[in-house]
Image (tube, grey):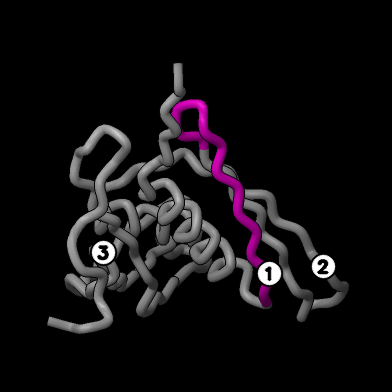
Amino acid sequence: MNPYCAQGASRSAFGEVVMLVQWKIKGSMVTTGIGVDPTAVVTLVKFVDGCEAGEYSQSKTGNGPINAACKAIEAITQVSLNVTFEIYAMTSGSNSEAKIVAKATQGNRIIPCEVRGGDIVMCAVEAYMQVLNVALEPEKVIAEVR
């Protein structure tokens, strides 16, 4: 057993065992163009309570490169999120830095995220992954004292 992994599972405010599942991007490749279906191949590493629990890859097509990558992530994680993306150019020119703002709604919870970088598609994928990992975190429940 890896000594740096979390020992034991957490418990919720109601005593249920809660395992923290997180995902990290290991690699991704997106193909798009004229006369080509946008396709993404994504490889993710799964962590459970801080311990590496496997590596998974998936290829999906979509209506654009970001959609294809999100579909591949959903196929791997089995988690479907309704994420909206806002894309901004932070500088001018063809080598502009992009800012991606992603937001997901989960019940009454809004999960925002912002990522900046030179590759719009990869920034959107990273933002999606950040939102996904927050969505997978158990909500902190504070019991009322009466």
The outermost residue toward the top is 146
Q: Give amino acid for label 2.
A: Met
**Disc 2 or 3, which lies upstream in sequence?**
3
Residue 107: mark? none
The location of residue 136, given as percent across then percent down, is 36, 49
Residue at the location (71% across, 63% down)?
99
Choose mark 2 or mark 3, whichever is in front.
3
Is label 3 in a helix, a strand or a loop? loop
Marks 3 and 1: CB-CB under 8 Å?
no
Marks 2 and 1: CB-CB under 8 Å?
yes
Is residue 19 rendered magenta in the image?
A: no
Residue at the location (35% across, 42% down)?
80
Task: Give left or right: position of 21 versus 132.
Answer: left
**Disc 2 or 1, which lies upstream in sequence?**
2
> In this figure, which residue is indicated by the disc labeled 1?
116
> In this figure, which residue is indicated by the disc labeled 2?
90
Q: Give amino acid for label 3.
A: Asp
**Disc 3 or 1, which lies upstream in sequence?**
3
Q: CA distance from mark 3 to mark 1?
A: 28 Å
Choose mark 3 or mark 1, whichever is in front.
3
What's the magenta region? 105-117
Q: Residues within 10 Å of mark 2 (few under 14, many from 20)?
A: few
Residue at the location (45% across, 27% down)?
107
Is label 1 in a helix, a strand or a loop? strand
Residue at the location (76% across, 81% down)?
95
Name the quarter where the N terminus is drawn.
Answer: bottom left
Q: Give amino acid for label 1.
A: Arg
> In this figure, which residue is indicated by the disc labeled 3?
49
Task: Give left or right: position of 89 versus 46.
Answer: right
Q: Residues within 10 Å of mark 1 (few under 14, many from 20)?
A: many
